[in-house]
Amino acid sequence: MKTAAVPAPKKLFNESESNLNMKESFNVKANKLMTYIMIGMVLSAYPIVYLFSVMDWIEQDNFLAFLSYTAVILVLMFLSLKVFGQKSYGKFITIGLMYALPIAISSTLYTRTAWTVLFLYLILSMLYLDKKVLYLSGGLGALNLGLIVSLDYTMISDPVEFSIMAVLYLFAVVGGYLVVAGGERLIAQISQDIHEITLQFKELESVIKSKILV
């Protein structure tokens, strides 16, 4: 008697990620997306900054410095993705390189609002839905903020404004933590549900095979 073919469960991830659990696989994909987002954002800024230099809003030397600094960081981010993209620690390298950009931007494009890019990077780091990544992002952001203020890149001298900057950033970190913590719980629940479904499928498969062989 011919046995009925039982469909195998659909593969959830690519073969290269089959040895990773659901969260790690998610982080691998998020790391790739983060890298290309950062590369796209900086490359799209080049024509705008060049236009500023043509209009004499910034000096030509500052534009060239911005171009060279950011280009080096982008190349390192791309190489990091290719070499460490499948590693569990690759995301931390990407975040570290990402936070090298604010200092490069602030030291070449002098503006009072350059520090606000830290909020954008903090939001982007939430893409991983990983509290460890958020801790690193929040710490590096705070370090960047301290350096930008201490090196006087913001051209702000009022202590009240410094305090407001710190409080706003703290609020953003706390808000990001709440979102990421919720995301981690969601991923854990989905992973548990998938595991239970897989077990139920195997039990059903065993029952079907036993019925067919009888």
Image: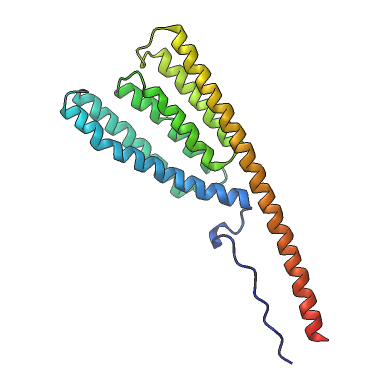
Image quarter of the C terminus = bottom right
Residue in the picture at 36% in, 16% down: 154
Q: How many marks?
A: 0
Name the spot of residue 23 as percent of width and height, x first.
61, 48
Residue in the picture at 54% in, 61% down: 14
Most foreground residue, 185 or 95: 185
Q: Is residue 164 left or right of residue 47?
A: right
Residue 164 visible at all: yes
Please determine whether, in this image, residue 51 is positioned above or below residue 212: above
Residue 86 visible at all: no
Please determine whether, in this image, residue 198 is positioned above or below residue 64: below
Name the spot of residue 181 as percent of width and height, x first.
64, 37
Q: Is residue 140 left or right of residue 184?
A: left
Name the spot of residue 111 as percent of width and height, x first.
32, 20
Most foreground residue, 200 or 88: 200
Q: On the image, which quarter does residue 212 sit in?
A: bottom right
Please determine whether, in this image, residue 154 is positioned above or below residue 116: above
Most foreground residue, 196 or 136: 196
Most foreground residue, 120 or 34: 120
Q: On the image, which quarter does residue 18 sit in?
A: bottom right
Name the spot of residue 180 as percent of width and height, x first.
59, 37
Q: Is residue 150 left or right of residue 136?
A: left
Q: On the image, which quarter does residue 66 sit in?
A: top left
